[in-house]
Image: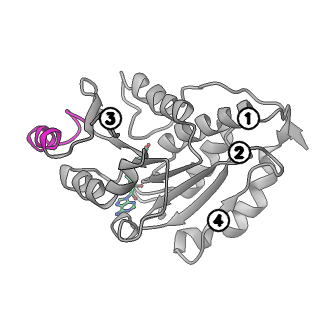
């Protein structure tokens, strides 16, 4: 079974980090970074209900249609059985789950969705909601999506390659600084880190200090909570 579905940015209605009034520009900005950067691999740490995952996945989906002349792709319900059979292994941390994109496509991309807690408690990762939201916003079948239980602090000891990292694990200046130094070589090579939190999202004095401490750190949105920051090598620096 196949489905025809809408591409282009759809502003998601999902309870999450960037769901406050005024955050529309942050949501669109996350999507735009994907479309502009044309990443092969995006890694996200901190999923909750999947708001940022959907923004990232929509960008990858639109790159898929840019690179391929698929008119139809298989219906999202294709993945239901696989998801139901394997979701417990993800929440327990015994295995990962990969939802593959259409075979034989050009330039297949990857989206790794990592969370330390897939237990659906409070703002922790809620695997069912993330899956349902990816499905609702037409994000299945156009990128290889991996779900896994991973601790960011363990991961940075031997980090995987990425083109974009979206970091949203109850960020603080200390978290950002740790990420920066652990991932410096990838940043030098052009990988970027999008960071939930900006001037109003993390303690402002800590944030101010980051601007001076970290060469490539800057804030994209500071007037709307929670803000959005970026670590990106500047040309000529
Ligand atoms: C604020 S929520 C993420 C919000 C989400 N990005 C959104 O767009 O709505 C923070 C997430 O970070 C996860 N988390 C907290 N500490 C973590 C760690 N050390 N490694 C990985 N994930 C972590 C939590 O389980 C939770 O899902």
Q: Residues within 10 Å of mark 1 (few under 14, many from 20)?
A: few
Is any part of residue 13 visible from this angle?
Answer: no
Determine the CA span between mark 4 and mark 2.
21 Å
Determine the CA span between mark 3 and mark 1.
28 Å
Q: Which mark is residue 219?
A: none
* Residue pointed to by mark 2: 107
Count of marks placed on residues: 4
- Which residue sits at x=70%, y=61%? 83
Left or right of 88? Residue 175 is left
* Residue pointed to by mark 4: 97
Q: Residues within 10 Å of mark 2 (few under 14, many from 20)?
A: few
- Asked which secondary structure carries label 1, the reply is helix
Rendered location of residue 99, percent (x, y): 70, 57
SS assignment for the magenta stretch, majority: helix
Location of the N terminus (image quadrant): top right
Determine the CA span between mark 3 and mark 4.
36 Å
* Residue pointed to by mark 1: 67
Rendered location of residue 7, percent (x, y): 69, 27
* Residue pointed to by mark 3: 234
Asked if marks 3 and 4 touch (Cβ < 8 Å), the reply is no
- Which residue sits at x=49%, y=47%? 163
Asked if marks 1 and 2 touch (Cβ < 8 Å), the reply is yes
Instruction: State the scheme by which the image is colored.
Output: one colour
- Lower position in the chain sequence, tag 4 or tag 2: 4
Rendered location of residue 22, percent (x, y): 36, 21
Of circles 4 and 2, the one toward us is 2
- Lower position in the chain sequence, tag 3 or tag 1: 1
- Lower position in the chain sequence, tag 1 or tag 2: 1
Q: How crowded is mark 4: few (under 14 residues within 10 Å), some or many (20 or more)?
A: many
- Which residue sits at x=74%, y=32%? 65
Left or right of 175? Residue 11 is right
Closer-to-camera residue (235/210): 235
């Amino acid at each position: 079974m196949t489905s025809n579905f809408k591409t282009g940015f759809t502003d998601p209605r999902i309870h999450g980090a960037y769901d406050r009034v005024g955050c529309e520009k942050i949501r669109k900005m996350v999507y735009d970074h994907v479309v502009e950067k044309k990443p092969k691999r995006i890694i996200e740490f901190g999923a909750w209900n999947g708001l940022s995952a959907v923004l990232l996945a929509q960008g990858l989906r639109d790159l898929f249609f840019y690179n391929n002349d698929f008119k139809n792709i298989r219906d999202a319900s294709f993945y239901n059985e696989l998801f139901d059979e394997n979701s417990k292994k993800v929440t327990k941390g015994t295995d990962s789950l990969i939802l593959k994109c259409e075979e034989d496509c050009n330039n297949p991309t990857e989206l790794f969705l990592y969370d330390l807690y897939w237990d659906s408690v409070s703002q922790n990762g809620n695997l069912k909601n993330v899956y349902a939201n990816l499905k609702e916003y037409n994000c299945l079948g156009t990128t290889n999506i991996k779900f896994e239980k991973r601790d960011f602090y363990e991961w940075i000891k031997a980090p995987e390659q990425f083109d974009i990292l979206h970091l949203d694990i109850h960020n603080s200046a200390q978290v950002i600084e740790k990420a920066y130094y652990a991932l410096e070589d990838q940043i030098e090579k052009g990988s970027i880190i999008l960071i939930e939190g900006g001037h109003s999202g993390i303690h402002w004095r800590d944030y101010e200090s980051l601007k001076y401490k970290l060469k490539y750190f800057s804030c994209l949105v500071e007037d709307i909570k929670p803000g959005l920051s970026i670590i990106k090598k500047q040309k000529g620096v």
